[in-house]
Image: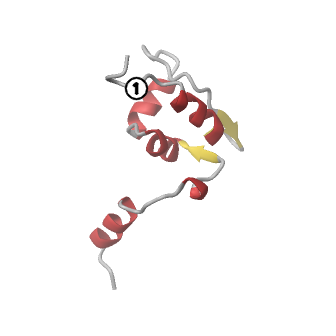
Amino acid sequence: METQEQVTKKKASRPITIGAWPKLLTIDLAAEYIGLAPRTLRNRLGRRAKEPFPVKPRRQGRGKIVFLRDDLDEYAANLPIEGYE
């Protein structure tokens, strides 16, 4: 039987291919997808955020916040690449 630490390490280091990502991403998955910390993404979604996140989330069910993967792909494609400006 695996310990909790082994399960956590296995879960954190799982490789995810593009086809394996769902179309709707929760805040945690969206943050992992674009390379931000989940807390940073949550902070940037707040009403009083100094630097609001440019991709508007959708609400699903009883207020569950989700992002469309295509919207995040478009956002990532338009980011400037550091060192090539």
What residue lies at 38% left-to-right and 38% top-to-bottom?
37
Looking at the rendered image, the quarter that the N terminus falls into is: bottom left
Residue 64 at least partly seen: no
Position above or below: 22 against 65? below
Helix, strand or loop status at disc 1: loop
Residue at image position (62%, 26%) is 56
**Residue position marked by numbered label 1 in the rendering:** 81
Front residue (pair 66, 19): 19
Q: What quarter of the picture does the C terminus occupy?
A: top left
Q: Amino acid at mark 1?
A: Ile
Label 1: few (<14), some (14–19) or many (≥20) C-alpha neighbours in 10 Å: few
Furthest residue in direction right, as rendered: 61
Q: Estimate the x, y position of residue 50 in percent, counting from the top left.
A: 42, 13
Residue 51 on image: x %, y %:
44, 16
Q: Within the image, what quadrant is residue 63 found in?
A: top right
On the image, the x and y values in percent for residue 3 come to: 29, 76
